Amino acid sequence: MQIILIFVFRLDGFFIFFFLKYIKGDGVRVAAFDATNTTFARRQHIVKVLKEAGIRSKKIFIESICDSTNILEDNIRKVKLNTPDYRGVDPEKAVDDFKMRRANYEKVYEPLSDQDGSYIKIINSKQYIVNGIRGYLPLKIVHFVMNLHTLSRTFYLTRHGQSEYNLLGKIGGDSGLTPAGTEYARRLAQFAKEQICTKDGSERPCRLWTSTLRRTKETSQFIDHSKFEHTWDNGEKQEWIQLRRQERRNLDELYAGTCDGMTYKEIEQVFPDEFARRQEDKLAYRYPRGESYMDVTLRLEPLAQEMERTREPVLIVGHQGILRIIYAYFMGLDRKEAPYVSIPLNNVIELTPHAYGCHEKRYCLMMKEEMLNDGQDEPVTSMPVKGHQSRVSDGGSVLAENMVFSETDPIMNAPSC
């Protein structure tokens, strides 16, 4: 199945060549085009070009209607001023120029109608009109679009504190924390109180998600759950329980199946063929009676949609395999890179998505010298490799605090699966 989401379309030969090559590939394909298809005639020209190229994909037009002055002004200043068009331009002049461009488009603009076929209309980011859309994947796209919003949001990712299985060099399991892991839990609680829950001197509502496994729940045990009244953007008031823990099964670590509870050395000795297959293709490799990174990606899909919908800061206490996929999704990394992303112990990764990428900031709450070696050295080709650790998407940035350890350090990068 191929689906084309049409925002804008520039019909130059360079674009068409790569578009056709992509959309005609094997498997499910979804392509999104961003531009200003302002008239019915122009939209029909797009459909004609696709038809002549022999592409029989489903097509969905997406129209965003915004007549709210507040939303427009906020969007222009937060998003449009950061585009390449206005780089280095005085902000006020840039705002005036963009408003003029918008006014020119309005002169020739023809709204979507039934004759355009399938479409989604978004009105002021809170009302939606869906027309003529059928099928499993198209409806999933509708659900995804309806969960998007224009508000800024921040996610905080951290692995659980050092576990007893980490110390023994075993993967998987459901062990508790070591004394070092418990100390990290105390520091995480302090960090959450001072850095996550407080903004501009006042408390803000935040969320806490963990897996259902013991080591993540114990890592969150010291976090304070104060109560206060919060007023939402629609005027409703509600008593908010700060960082109330929500245990989510789809955040559980990648299941190692028959290898669960073994060390990597034991896996190499007992299952040498499995060990070799994992080394060759870590993304697709599935443990016997267990999971692969591809499997985990599928069960994380609903979580990713909820993260797109959520407006409050979210602290996720999870596992290395899980956080790698979440990190890769927001940083725009290829899925083949996800299994090699560096997610060190005792660190909090702050991610702030924006229109043209994702800003990243890392905080090291506990130094390597304060821990014992966990003995869990992951096979060399499975450890983060050069070129994977610090890559960010276009427009992204990385800022690390107190990170003095090597990115391939077997202690701080203690793997789970």
Image (cartoon, helix red, strand yellow):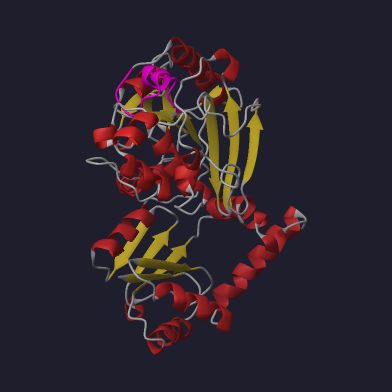
- Give the residue drawn at x 37%, y 67%: 29
> Which quadrant would the N terminus be assigned to in this image?
bottom left
Q: Which residues are magenta?
A: 159-175
Q: Viewed as shown, does residue 346 lie left or right of 174? A: right
Where residue 173 appears, x then y in whole percent? 30, 25
Depth order, front residue of 60/371: 371
Q: Is residue 369 above or below residue 200?
A: above
Residue 90 drawn at (x, y percent): 77, 55
Q: Main secondary structure of the magenta part?
A: loop
Q: Where residue 218 appears, x then y in whole percent?
A: 37, 17
As displayed, is residue 57 above or below residue 217?
below
Q: Please state if 253 lies on the left or on the right of 200 as rendered.
A: left
Can residue 301 be seen at all in this image of the molecule?
yes
Q: How far from the left and from the top, in percent, is residue 169?
A: 40, 23
Q: Is residue 172 magenta?
A: yes
In this rendered view, identify the residue nearer to me: 158 or 165: 165
Image height check: is 412 above or below 358? above
